[in-house]
Image (tube, coloured by chain):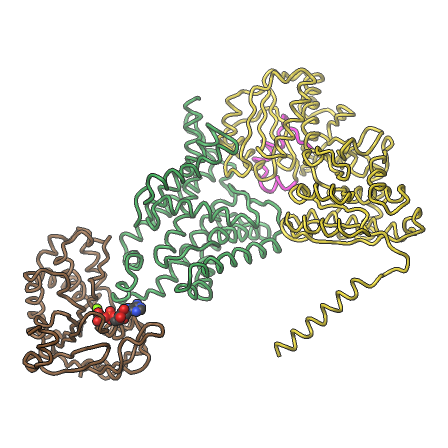
Amino acid sequence: MLVSVQDITAGYGSVTVIKNISLEVDRGEWVAVIGGNGAGKSTLFRVISGLVRPRSGKIYFEGRELTALPPHEIVNKGIIQVPEGRMLFPKMNVIDNLLLGGRNRRARNNVNESLKKVYDLFPILEKRASQEAGTLSGGEQQMLATARGLMALPRVLLLDEPSLGLAPLMVREIFNSLQILNKEGMTILMVEQNVVVSLKNAERAYVLENGEIVMSGSSKDLINDDRTKQAYLGI
Amino acid sequence: MGKQILFVASLTMLLVAALGITPVVAVDPVKIGCHGAFTGKYAAYGMSTLHAVRYEVAKKNAEGGIKSLGGAKIQLIEMDNATNAKDSVANHERLGTNPAVLAVIGPCTTPMSQPVEPIAARYRLPTVHSITTLDKIFEHGNEYVFTVSVLASRYGATYASFMVAMHEKYGLTLNRITMAYPDNDYGISVVDGFKKGMKKAGFDKNIVLDLPFNWKSKDLSPIVLKIKAAKPDFHLQVAYFADGKLYHDACYNLGFHPWQVGGASGFNHPKLWKTLGEKIGGATIGNKKTFAYDMAAFDLPNAGRDAWTKGFTAKHPDITVEMNLLLGAMAARFVIEAIEKAGKRDRTAIAGALHSLTLEKDDPRDLAGTYKKPGPVWMRNGKPNSYGYIAQWEKGNGRWSKKTLFHPLMGMLAVPKAFR
Amino acid sequence: MDITIIAQALIQGLMLGAIYGLIGLGITMVYAITGLLNFAHGDFMAIAMYLCLALFTHFNMDPYLSSLIAVPALFVLGLMVYHFLFRRVLKAELLMVVQLTLGMVFIIESSLLLTFTADYESVPNILHAVRFSLGPLSVSGSYLATFLVGGGAGAALYWVLQKTDLGRQIRAISQNKDAATLMGINTTRIQMIVFALAIALLGLSGSLTTSILTMEPYMGLELTLFAFIVFVMGGVGNFLGTLVAGYLLGIADAMGSLFIGGHLGAMVPYGLFVLLLLFRPQGILGAK
Ligand SMILES: Nc1ncnc2c1ncn2[C@@H]1O[C@H](COP(=O)(O)OP(=O)(O)O)[C@@H](O)[C@H]1O
Ligand SMILES: [Mg+2]
């Protein structure tokens, strides 16, 4: 297993947000975590990236424990998160955003090639290279956020709600790019409220409800599961 | 462990308190308060006063105490205001409400002294300041406040009579007179005294520039530019140390070297030489056209001061005798003398006795050498009847020192550098 | 009024303004990456100035030479203050920060007072008695040096911020700290370095101005006040704005005392500050 989350409990202050969560992602897999607003999906990602310390439980990457590492060391290992809401550096231009993405220890010697690669994937970014990130359209911003993540040469890419706030056409474009990446071997762990899109793209999924995993399985099985249909697909 | 420490600490405190209230002498002592800035920013001034006062009290006690009160010893109550006007007020209140306290020396320095003036009046507590210069404190008809230092307005009067003397004796023109001063109580008092003096001599119409400035400025170039543009025949610069330094820097930088007199610390402080450096210092405060106010004339003979210095240095060889020390000693002496003279433990009588103190010509009690006129020590309202001197920096044997040139009551005492 | 007088005053204002800008820049840097204000800011400059005084008194060292000691010394001091004190209040209530830094003010001022007494001090440097003139205008060597080095340091810092990886990291943290962390930036380390750099900058300002300003143990808070004004005027967290605001404040200072004078003239910089708050609350160049 590339990533193995074992029995993680975490929260803020005295509030517990996620309870005893375990999940696994294998090399090259595309795994989704689906769940409603406030289920604790982003919190789970923040724990994996080291921004929130878990109360208990452990996280392993390639069999090595991550849990005690500071966030920047987790990034240096290749665990790269594209956070919810994109979190660009709005007053910096596109290129500076990308360069920041590519400055971790593993990626920094590869910046030029990475830059070429993300421009290939998202040609519009090259056109906008010297424009301030804050002035881009929503779709462009999501592309930039994803591209910035790719600049970091992820060994696993954590995507927090990549479709949030985007028009359907844009969603399709983003996911097309993600599919290309996944086909090339990129491991993706993705969090989504958009269940249809998730299950269509990911191979496997976990269902998170009130901070607990209530279901998991292959996307095909989950699409056909009555409970999923009722709760998330509105069928 | 923590509790033990607390216990020991409280025990110690109790012990200290108990010792503090145990009568030290059998006969009721005469209590005098001495409070001032013994710590904090102005600690140097406060400690000068305190050293001198302690010395005088110890001396009087060794000589047998207050004779008119059956040899009562003097007990000094020392209180620190930590250079803080609020504490100064609180200290004065406490001394005022203690009926055994007959008089207070201090608090020294104007910011600490100003707020205690009404308290002195309320408790009829004779309060003798040592180095307070502000005229305003003594203008409310309060019979209980006094100061030993020369007042700010008298600085101004001294500048005026010096300028006039330079005109009369050495023919300097006074057609265009300029003055610049910090726009605070002190600066305004000095300039008021100056203007009054110039008016008496008929030169007030010749004041072409009246320039108050912010004494906290970080740069005085604009001020100097304005003075320079007014083309003065003679300029008066009222200056503290810091703005004095800035003034001299700016004058040097702008190549402006008029006939001028100024002070106090901004012209007479020895440290200016270190601060300005030899080159700028030589061109500004060391210039032959520049004169400095100086309260003490240490280069002039003063038998009283020499005798006092000898006695004090024998006891405290490590403390340098300087002006603030002398003023503290004078304050203490006047208070002790007034109590002796009053002959009773009565604050009003002591205030009256202070008012009735007089000095002879060249009185040995005039340690500072600023009273040059026989008569009462204080005019009405506790203003001292004293003036400072005008001096000039001179270089001899490679060292700069001040030579006293002028006193308003004695006239020119020496020839200025420019006319030798 | 004569035009040369105005020009001369303008020059002086610009010279002084370079210092204000430099002092303010430190506040801006620290605020940008920690969101905190350090009330003891000016007191570190006082420390640097007294360090120069001590080196001058004991070793007769020129303050310009002393800067070679003062700058690294203050940098190290900044690292320590950050590590042992400032770091601990990063996530605390604002009031805690105010208390901590005001506590530092008290400690620094008292220590300076105990070590150096309350006397005014100032140390001349080699350029202090050198005058440069251009026609009717003249400027003192130490002012010019302050202007050039101060302006140069400001420009260098601006270049670092805009063009280097460190600068990019600093700007990233100031724009979104969590996102910066996700880029693999060691935010704690950068915060510490920037805090120390800001303090080191005061080491430079202090060494440059020992001959121009008179020092006394309590000077720090006033400098902090100026730094805050420049910081807000420049548009909270705007580096270039801070430098520009410094010059404006210096000029306002000079013009105020030239044309109005006295207390009222001294109010001109503050008046400018208030006006700016009223009509352009985002600062001269806008907030970051
Ligand atoms: N920084 C925070 N402090 C306190 N509570 C938080 C914080 N962030 C999120 N929460 C709470 O944790 C719960 C889960 O939030 P989140 O992980 O963002 O959910 P999701 O991403 O699934 O929408 C919510 O109830 C939210 O209010
Ligand atoms: Mg979320």
Q: Is residue B100 left or right of residue B230?
A: right
Chain A image colour: brown
**Quadrant for ligand 1?**
bottom left
Q: Is residue B280 left or right of residue C161?
A: right
Q: Nearer the viewer, residue B347 or B364?
A: B347
Q: Position of residue A25 (x, y in %)?
A: 16, 80
Q: Position of residue A206 (x, y in %)?
A: 15, 79
Chain C image colour: green
Q: Nearer the viewer, residue C73 or A74?
A: A74
Q: Residue at x 57, y 28 (%)?
A: B180
**Residue B322 visible, this angle:** yes
Q: Is residue A83 left or right of residue C127?
A: left
Q: Residue at x 72, y 49 (%)?
A: B92
- Give the magenta part as a residue range: B270-293
Q: Quadrant of residue A107?
A: bottom left
- Above-or-below relation of A223 to C44: below
Q: How many marks?
A: 0
Q: Residue at x 72, y 53 (%)?
A: B79
Q: Position of residue C215 (x, y in %)?
A: 55, 46
Q: Position of residue C175 (x, y in %)?
A: 28, 57
Q: Quadrant of residue A53?
A: bottom left
Image quadrant occupied by the N terminus of chain C: top left
Q: Which chain is yellow?
A: B
**Residue A106 visible, this angle:** no
User: Is residue C91 one of those drawn in magenta?
Assistant: no
- Above-or-below relation of B7 to B347: below
Q: Nearer the viewer, residue B322 or B52?
A: B52
